[in-house]
Image (cartoon, rainbow, N blue to C red):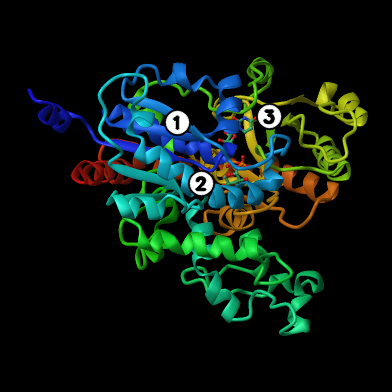
């Protein structure tokens, strides 16, 4: 067989590039593994920093060693070595990548060897799957005639609100600094409960305070805010959009998105989709070391007796906020397993140590750890509710596990996710814009006591629908096969 015939036999080669943040990498690695399981060649393009963090705790290479067509490539994020690269600074990371990514990406694509290093015959990249906020690869893909698909790792409701932000601004539902001083101050004047009418499909329940937190700016011309709008609307000029959700959860919003973007692939929940195809549990893709003592502690607790508390990989808490949550949990009388990342307490001079009051009081009440295997925790029989910041991965993991939620959104898409949990799917309570021990205690008692059966019933029903979506013949499974067909047809 000649060289060309041999090349023609090779499978499609997909390049995937996540924004180098935990929540984005988690879901994109799951997609990469699903594609590898379908015998495609996949190259994951990490930033040098995120790759070093992953190698420390997640060991990507060994997880993917079973797939001969998998490779890792890296690029520089353009930031100084001492940049903290924490979630609070996500926009700086994104803006830097938008600036330096294009030239590096072009070089990467032009030197095929860089993508096929490590031996083994591989085609040049035949399809790009890029993080929905990083469009620097588009000009190169267009020049090379390579189809590119966006993967927006946040929720469909957040994506759709972002996509409609210009209409929200035109309708005066976001303050225009200088143009109308009165409106400009409404974030402070408390008009946050006014309804928002300019996001189609959400007119009945979306308030100003529920909009994605990107728009809580002093000026709608804010450059980062405008970047979010620009990057989101670019999805309409791609070969398609992948979303980590499923039709029974987000159908009405997915139908709205299909108007400007008909080629939509809802293939979630990705973690259970991958588990279904792997027929085994998932390995970690965490930046942090998972503490397995969490599972031992849970094994010693009665069924449905524990509130699991975690605010993701980005959220920062002030000491006062932390103590309000802690006293609320302790006063609720329920036990809790609390993930407190070492870097998550603002102004904590004893880096990584839990404040003494919290440490002292948790001995009999609960278990405080730095990072846990969250998916295993959520399906543990002792967990009765999830006190979460509503990051999209956590929200979807809780939906798939059938665990009711108490939502305290911190930023980004979390503010609209929590509204959907409480008002649309009705599988939890929304504590948005408050941090008060009395409210915490009340909500914990409500979800673990008075209204437990009501929330559990709805959460279980949605979990069954999530499971059906990723099973053979389910909507997410069918959409994934449609995505595979598109990738194979783009050779
Ligand atoms: C970020 C943004 O904050 C979020 O709003 C957006 O939707 C995705 O990107 P993050 O804040 O990290 O994500 O939250 P989330 O999306 O919930 O992702 C956190 C991931 O870390 C989850 O997959 C969760 O399972 C995992 N996790 C969390 C652990 O494995 N162990 C823990 O102890 C805590």
Give left or right: position of 184 versus 203.
right
Crowd around label 1: few <14 · some 14–19 · many ≥20 (10 Å): some
- For marks 3 and 1, give the one nearer the viewer: 1
Q: Earlier in the sequence, mark 2 or mark 3?
A: 2
Q: Is mark 2 within 8 Å of ligand 1?
A: no
Q: Residue at x 46, y 69 (%)?
A: 201
- Residue that carries the numbered disc 3 in the rendered image: 305
Query: Considering the numbered disc 3 on the image, is that residue within a helix, a strand or a loop?
Result: loop
Cα distance between the residues tagged 2 and 1: 13 Å
Crowd around label 2: few <14 · some 14–19 · many ≥20 (10 Å): many
Quarter of the image for residue 240 reads bottom left
Give left or right: position of 241 versus 437.
left
- Image quadrant for the C terminus? top left
Q: Residue at x 65, y 72 (%)?
A: 221
Q: Quarter containing ligand 1?
A: top right
- Residue that carries the numbered disc 1 in the rendered image: 73
Residue 185 at what x, y percent from top left? Answer: 79, 75
Q: Residue at x 79, y 43 (%)?
A: 317
Q: Earlier in the sequence, mark 3 or mark 1?
A: 1
Residue 420 at what x, y percent from top left? Answer: 56, 56
In this rendering, is residue 459 above or below 206?
A: above
Is residue 264 at all visible to an observer of this figure? no
Q: Residue at x 32, y 28 (%)?
A: 36
In this rendering, is residue 247 above or below 33?
A: below
What mark, if any, has residue 101 been given in the picture?
Answer: 2
Residue 3 versus residue 221: which sits nearer the camera?
3
In this rendering, is residue 114 above or below 192?
A: above
- Image quadrant for the N terminus? top left
Whether label 2 touches label 3, CB < 8 Å: no
């Amino acid at each position: 067989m000649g060289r060309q015939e041999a090349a023609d036999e090779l499978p499609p080669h997909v390049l995937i590039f996540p924004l180098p943040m935990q929540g984005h990498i988690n879901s994109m690695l799951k997609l990469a593994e699903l594609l590898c399981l379908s015998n495609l060649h996949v190259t994951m393009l990490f930033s040098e920093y995120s790759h070093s963090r992953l190698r420390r705790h997640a060991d990507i290479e060994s997880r993917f060693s079973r797939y001969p067509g998998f490779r890792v490539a890296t690029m520089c994020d353009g930031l100084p070595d001492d940049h903290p690269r924490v979630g609070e600074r996500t926009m700086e990371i994104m803006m830097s990548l938008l600036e330096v990514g294009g030239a590096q990406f072009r070089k990467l694509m032009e030197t095929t060897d860089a993508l096929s290093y490590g031996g083994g015959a591989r085609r040049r990249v035949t399809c790009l799957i890029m993080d929905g906020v990083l469009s620097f690869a588009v000009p190169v893909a267009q020049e090379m005639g390579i189809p590119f698909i966006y993967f927006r790792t946040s929720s469909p409701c957040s994506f759709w609100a972002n996509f409609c932000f210009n209409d929200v601004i035109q309708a005066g539902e976001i303050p225009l600094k200088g143009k109308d001083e009165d409106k400009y101050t409404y974030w402070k004047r408390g008009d946050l409960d006014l309804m928002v009418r300019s996001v189609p499909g959400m007119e009945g329940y979306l308030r100003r305070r529920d909009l994605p937190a990107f728009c809580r700016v002093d000026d709608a011309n804010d450059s980062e805010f405008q970047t979010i709008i620009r990057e989101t609307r670019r999805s309409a000029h791609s070969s398609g959009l992948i979303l980590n959700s499923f039709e029974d959860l987000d159908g009405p919003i997915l139908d709205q998105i299909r108007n400007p973007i008909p080629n939509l692939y809802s293939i979630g929940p990705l973690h259970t989709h991958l588990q279904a195809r792997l027929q085994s549990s998932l390995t970690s893709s965490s930046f942090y070391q998972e503490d397995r003592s969490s599972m031992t502690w849970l094994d010693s607790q009665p069924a449905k007796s524990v509130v699991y508390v975690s605010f993701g990989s980005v959220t920062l808490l002030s000491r006062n906020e932390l103590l309000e949550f802690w006293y609320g949990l302790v006063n609720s009388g329920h036990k809790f397993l609390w993930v407190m990342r070492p870097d998550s307490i603002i102004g904590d001079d004893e880096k990584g140590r839990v404040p003494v009051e919290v440490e002292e009081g948790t001995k009999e009440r609960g278990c405080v750890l730095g990072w846990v295997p969250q998916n295993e925790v959520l399906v543990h029989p002792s967990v009765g509710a999830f006190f979460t910041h509503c990051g999209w991965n956590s929200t979807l993991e809780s939906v798939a596990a059938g665990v009711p939620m108490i939502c305290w959104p911190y930023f980004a898409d979390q503010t609209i996710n929590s509204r959907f949990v409480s008002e649309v799917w009705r599988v939890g309570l929304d504590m948005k814009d408050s941090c008060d021990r009395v409210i915490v205690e009340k909500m914990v008692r409500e979800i673990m006591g008075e209204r437990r059966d009501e929330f559990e019933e709805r959460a279980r029903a949605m979990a069954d629908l999530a499971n059906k979506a990723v099973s053979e013949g389910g909507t997410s499974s069918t959409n994934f096969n449609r995505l595979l067909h598109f990738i194979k047809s783009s050779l």
